[in-house]
Image: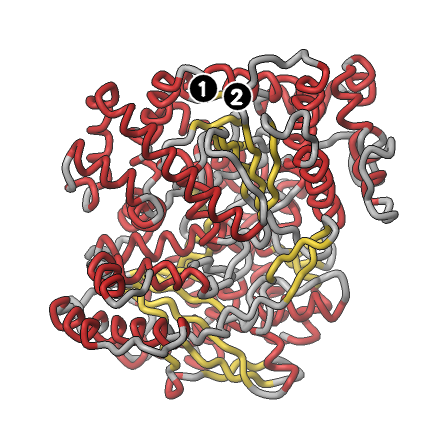
Amino acid sequence: METTEFIKQLEELKTEGKTTQELYNEISSLAMIFGLRKEQRPVVKNAYYLSMEFLIGRSFFNNLMELGVLDETRNILAQKGIDINIFEEIEDAALGNGGLGRLAACFLDSAAGLGLPLQGYGIRYRYGLFKQAIENGFQVELPDDWQRFGDPWSIRRENEKRTVRFADMTVTAVPYDMPVFGKRINVLRLWQAEGDEEAQKISEYLYPADDTEEGKLLRLRQEYFFSAAAVGELIEKHVKLYGRKFHNFADFNVIQLNDTHPVLAIAEFIRILIADYQVNFSDAVEIARKTFAYTNHTIMPEALECWDAGQVKKILPDIYALLIKLHLKQKEDFDKLNCSEEEASDMAIYSSDRFSMANLAVYIGKTVNGVAKLHTEILKDSLFRTAYRYYPEKFQNKTNGITQRRWLMLCNRELSELIDNTIGKEWRSDISLLCGLNGHIPEITNEFVRVKAVKRKQLFDYIKKHEGIDIPENFIVYSQVKRLHEYKRQLMTAFAILEIYKGLKDGTVKDFQPSVFVFGAKSAPSYKRAKAIIKFINEVADKLNSDEQTNKFLKVVFVQNYNVSYAEKIVAGTDVSLQVSTAGLEASGTGNMKFMMNGAVTCGTMDGANIEIVELAGKENNYIFGAEVDEIEKLKTEGYEPAKLMQKNALHRYAVSALTDGTFSDGGTGCFKDLYDALIVGASWHKPDHYFVLHDLQSYVEALLKINTDYKDQKSFATKQLKNTANSAFFSSDRTIMEYAEEIWNITD
């Protein structure tokens, strides 16, 4: 891109009388014009990343930074009397829910930054997930019209639309291309469903409620819709370039399935080869085996897609027939391997009148990877233990990563400049050089403390503007921001806060450094317990923030509508990253990496990527507590009685009883009683406290109080924080993407 010409046109841009929206669209369009002029080097092989989510966040600042004109744009606008931060009111592109979608966005960013040909495929949701409001402490879901300011970073490709057929309807899939700027320009292609009213519903919302037959069918339609559009297009492109011979398809294309949502792409790929190009079934299967790779993101059963065979047959009869044929072939393969009946059932594509997308992905995929060291071991030892026994060569680990471009350079300019001044700017293009900070930590701790104070102030100003809550500048920031789920144990953090609060009230907690606990999370609309936890946290926040005796020492904030833009402020301003999932259940996490890179210590369990964080930055520079995986498994087999544990501990009794003793109100819904029963009584589908909240609670409180004490020696604590930043390069998605490129995709720049 000729930046001088962009700067010249920006200087000539008339700004008087224009709205924020008009300026945003004009500057964005100008950047697109120049950005897309970049010449592309031809490549032999492309990788394609199919994902239900791409949580890309706001494109404006990131794209201007990638194009090398962010600072110039900031300065030119300032000369015109415009603060570039006015564009923060532009909506995030709400095309994802959590780590799965954010990871996909980081991967695209890193691939472009490294010059690797990786293209994304997903859905262009009209409303995305939802916009979260908090009313009387409860989550309320509102339509998230992220396009209301326009979408200047997307290009509609009308002449490349496709037809996707269901038994009861035909849908037009119209592609919108979002360029991903870097060393090369890659593309995120998002399909928009068009046609009649029913057809349009397919791309209306991310994750529509699936607690009804209609909702389940809509989810199935969504997953087939974008998968079919993607593989259909790729096959047609191959035919145009290389003819109808498919033996070499995998020499030019590799398709990565981001979790189980796009796995129907395998069946559609085989179906097209057979139906449209007369490839025989066995050959089509072998071509698919060389083409597809599968990433597993979780062992949680609700995220491992299993489709009712009757539903598939109802709207996708050809796919149903193909899946049954694959199942029969799989049985033949298992017979040749002398699998037992139990082993065959464990790996079956079709069982109990349901199709397992995970088992299909493992059976066909050339590789299967987990996303952190512990997670991959759990896949091999537990979830896919039988498949690993028979196909060990398929399994790999690819620990997740984050893009340092957005999550350090963009969101923390002050820390980035400190790093520049300490080790030079070369780390910006080679993140591995960040470890050079280790040799300079003693000399920069004072400056780092100043930077942290600046970022806290920015965060507190943002919270004041959006939540109306004042936080004094001397408060330590503890943050737990992520999707709301019971296993992530936001409820345990709420209990820990209550125990500290009681200690402050009765004087048993002394000399306490003022602290604020920041929560940010959305619950799935139909996840009643998660929504109850949000209500409980907000009840705790209201009580503590209004208590004149203690609120100068302890505050709680639940930020509304947590998203990428809010995260950019929180990760830069946080001192302590709370990563407290039940050991063995968090596959990796990526929030933990963002906090680490920005100089927060981790207070967490030995779960997911926390394990690798403490290996790299040192256990002494983080705060680990709670049961590890082996102990959790032992508790499951030998027995665990949380009710007895609560009775023995007065503080636990105080915190947990607050759910039902009238301390807090659930608005007459009974949802707090359900949370209490889940911990103490259990339910028809689980034992009491199946996420071991009460087991880990005391060690959690002790860890939080130790952090508070250690923080008083600010230089020593800043050293711990800097050690985390200095050793965070491993968690760059540049490293992750290079591992995929070299060990799975076989692509080069």
Tag 2 and tag 1, C-beta contact below 8 Å: yes
The residue that appears at 69% across and 42% down in the rendered structure is 538
Disc 2 from disc 1: Cα separation: 8 Å
N-terminal-most mark, 2 or 1: 2
Horizontal arrangement in the rendering, residue 553 relative to residue 216 (left or right): left
Name the residue rendered at 58%, 44% in the picture: 469
Q: Position of residue 115 (x, y in %)?
A: 21, 57
Q: Nearer the viewer, residue 248 or 229?
A: 229
Q: How many marks?
A: 2
Residue shown at 57%/34% (left/top)?
Answer: 517
- State the SS at label 1: loop
Checking the image for residue 711, the label placed there is 1
Dot 1 alpha-carbon crowd within 10 angstroms: few under 14, some 14 to 19, many 20 or more: some
Does the image show residue 435? Answer: yes
Q: Which residue is disc 2 drawn over?
A: 513
Q: Is residue 168 left or right of residue 511?
A: right
Residue 67 sits in quarter: bottom left
Give the answer, above or below, for where 434 lies relative to 67: above
For the residue labelled by badge 2, is the local secondary structure a helix, a strand or a loop?
A: loop
- Residue 462 rendering spot, x and y as whole percentages: 48, 48
Three-letter amino acid code at disc 1? Tyr
The picture quadrant where one finds residue 510 is top right
Q: Which mark is residue 620?
A: none
Above or below: residue 587 compared with residue 132: above
Foreground disc of the pair 2, 1: 2
What amino acid type should be assigned to the residue bearing mark 2?
Gln
Seen from the viewer's position, the closer of residues 535 and 612 is 535
Q: Quadrant of the N terminus?
A: bottom left
372 displayed left or right of 448: right
